[in-house]
Amino acid sequence: MKVIFNNVLFVYDYDTIFTTTEVTLFIIILILIIIPKIIDNNK
């Protein structure tokens, strides 16, 4: 998974279509997906 994420970030950095705002939104969405999974694991 780390490789996939690194490739995605690499594409974002390389492609001028993506802005830093869109990258930030992407990271926020990832966090919103990951946090509920962590909470479920703690139960």
Image (spheres, rainbow, N blue to C red):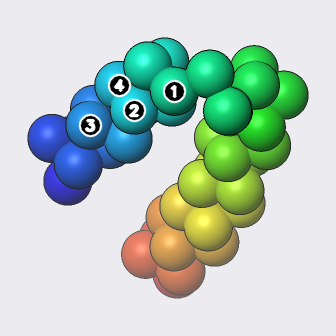
What is the number of the mark on residue 15?
1
Q: CA separation, marks 3 and 2?
A: 6 Å
Q: Of tags 2 and 1, which is closer to the observer?
A: 1
How busy is the neighbourhood of tag 4: few (under 14 within 10 Å), some, or many (20 plus)?
Answer: few
Is there a contact, CB below 8 Å, between mark 2 and mark 1? yes
Residue 27 position by quadrant: top right
Q: Nearer the viewer, residue 7 or 15?
A: 15
Is there a contact, CB below 8 Å, between mark 3 and mark 4? yes
In the rendered view, tell whether residue 21 sits above or below residue 2.
above
What is the number of the mark on residue 7?
3
Q: Of tags 4 and 1, which is closer to the observer?
A: 1
Give the residue drawn at x 51%, y 73%.
37
The picture places residue 9, in percent across and down from the top left corner, at 42, 30
The picture places residue 43, in percent across and down from the top left corner, at 52, 81
* Residue linked to disc 4: 10
Where disc 2 sits, the SS reads helix
The picture places residue 34, in percent across and down from the top left corner, at 54, 61
Give the residue drawn at x 67%, y 46%.
26
Residue 10 position by quadrant: top left
Q: Of tags 3 and 1, which is closer to the observer?
A: 1
